Amino acid sequence: MSHDGSLAGAGAAAPEKQTILPPGCRILAVGEGDFAFSESLAASLQPLTQGQIVATCYDSEAETLERYSACGGGRLDRMRAAGAEVLCGVDATLPVSANKPRDGPADMCVSNRMMLVAFLRSAEKLLRPSGRVIIASKDLYPYSWWRIESLPQWAQGELHLLDMLPWELTEYPSIYRGPCNVNRDAAVKATD
């Protein structure tokens, strides 16, 4: 979703690869689970400048290390060594919240939608004119029920959807090659 009104690929065939994060941009990853997203970014953007990547999650660091074996296996330490700032125990709904909202039954899907709409309303005020909000999600239930494509309209601001594409078509084709499930370390269905 873009603040500057540009539309990637409008009127033309989609390029083989699309740049979603311009060089030198600052990245705030909100709602990380196992930090696979931010670790991939940190590895691909070396060397990092101070404050270039700040990655947050809701769970405490102890809960994160216990819940995700990859984090306990050194992921958070590797990210910090690479120059990323890692913050655990961050409740991003206060006052701004969206990499991965909590999943669950249908009422939880509606709650996640509402949280993401509130996040977009708040984020719009904080973005630079050419800033972007990128929401990483899976395209299967319950995530598909979040209706990410409709969130900018529901937020009633100036943000709009640029594109929905699999990571393989970005500058980060291997970002989700490994497990990224909540409460388990099994592989997920690839995004179509």
Image (spheres, rainbow, N blue to C red):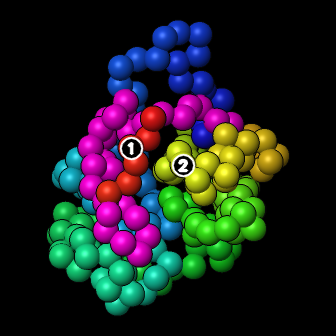
Residue at 54%, 49% (x, y): give it. Answer: 140
Along the line of sight, which residue is nearer the eye, 1 or 147?
A: 147
* Residue 38 visible to the viewer: no
Disc 2 marks a residue whose amino acid type is: Leu
Residue 147 is left or right of residue 136, and the answer is right
Q: Quadrant of the N terminus?
A: top right
Report whether residue 146 is seen: yes
Looking at the picture, how far across and down is residue 41, in whole percent? 30, 52
Which amino acid, mark 1?
A: Ala
**Taking 33 as reference, is 131 left or right?**
right
Tell me the element at label 1: loop
Residue 48: where, in percent of width, then height? 24, 55
Q: Quadrant of residue 153?
A: top right
Task: Give the magenta-colored segment's residue range.
Answer: 159-186
Residue lying at the far bottom of the rendered structure? 62
Q: Which corner quadrant holds the C terminus?
A: top left
Please tell me whether residue 178 belongs to the stretch shown in magenta: yes
Up-down relation of residue 69 to residue 61 (above or below): above
Q: Residue 101, how many percent across, how many down?
A: 57, 65
Residue at figure coordinates x 18%, y 76% from the top left: 73
Q: Residue at x 46, y 74 (%)?
A: 57
Image: 162 above or below 94: above
- Mark 2 = which residue? 140
> Residue 121 location in percent, x, y?
73, 55
**Residue for badge 1:** 190
Dot 1 surroundings within 10 Å: few (below 14), some, or many (20 or more)?
few
Judged from the image, the secondary structure of the residue bearing numbered disc 2 is loop
What secondary structure do most residues of the magenta stretch adopt?
loop
Q: Is residue 71 magenta?
A: no
In the rendered view, does 50 fall on the left or right side of 156? left
Q: Quadrant of residue 61?
A: bottom left
